[in-house]
Image: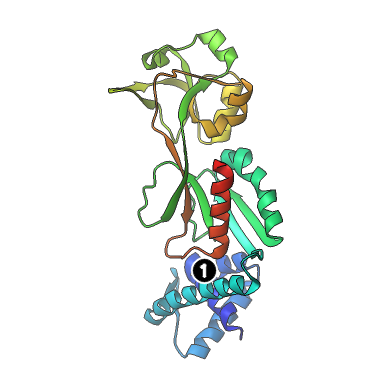
Amino acid sequence: MNRLAAMETFVRVVETGSFSAAARQLRVGQPAVSKSVAQLEEFLGVKLLTRSTHGLTPTEAGLGYLERARRALEEAAEAEIAARGAGAGLKGRLRVCAAVTFARIHLIPMLPKFLAQHPELELEVVLDDRQIDLVQEGIDVALRMGKMTDSTLTARRVARCKRLVLGTPAYFDRAGTPATPSELSRHQAVVYLREGSVWSFQRESTELAVTVRSRLRVTAAEGVRAAVLADAGLAIASEWMFTPELKSGAVRAVLPEWSLPALDLWAVLPTGRAATAKARAFVNFFERSFNG
């Protein structure tokens, strides 16, 4: 029995909650996962998991072993990095999660450089606008935007940008350019459901909340982009969402005297798991590249 491999298998089973999910992450068959955990239990002489119709839960002994197994795996990975030397590349698999539009415009174009620096590293990029369960999906690091409402997550803010009211020149030629936030109620808005239809503005000490009129509400940022670029209306969006179009003039911002709450970008690590060398290297690379 390979003890480190068995430890990793056990940790994945606990984190995902099933043998089948762990098998998918490890890219092996489910029988191999079951056998590995059984061999580990036999080697240790204790039951690590309780199996029931509701799933798998660690026993008291399993919970104690889980934390030590995690530390052992992380220390083994760190030892490998140190042994290969500070200048050596990373190896293995790294799973990164990000929102679809942000990844397409900003993240994906950076990745060839990161992969060139680490020829033995494999990247899996999970694109999803939802805030998925990082442990269940086997994510090493996620890039998330907005407020961090879950205090149990390990998160580091890596960037911040403005949010703007924007639309195409063709839309503003047709509907007019709003001069104040109050005038937005007379416009057609493309509402991103995560943002809502109440928009809050500030200018010096003045604060103003505006409820916009919308016949088009979209659940994904790609849909907001497509609708705005089709001249369907104006929208509130981050500079990141329309970076190419703002530079080219295909989209322009209005109400420059008024500000909206800024948008933060966070690098988030799974709960209860220390950052691996691969995850730290990726976050550092991304932060330098994105803000450079």
Q: Residue, x 54% and y 29% (percent of image)?
A: 224
Render colour scheme: rainbow
Tell me where residue 204 sits by quadrant.
top left
* Residue in the picture at 44% in, 84% down: 47
Which residue is under mark 1?
18
Picture quarter with the C terminus:
top right
The vertical placement of 98 against 261, above or below, is below
- Residue 280 point in image, percent of width and height: 53, 59
Question: Which SS class for mark 1?
Answer: loop
Q: Sort mark 1 into few (<14), some (14-19) or many (20+) by Cα contacts within 10 Å.
A: some
Q: Position of residue 198 (x, y in %)?
A: 37, 26
Quadrant position of the N terminus in the picture: bottom right
Q: Is residue 256 left or right of residue 106?
A: left
Q: Position of residue 28 (x, y in %)?
A: 65, 71
**Residue 262, image quadrant:** top left
What amino acid does circle 1 point to?
Answer: Ser
Residue 139 in view, yes or no: no
Residue at 48%, 77% (x, y): give it: 69
Report which quarter residue 226 is drawn in.
top right
- Taking depth in this image into account, of 277 and 141 the one nearest to the observer is 277
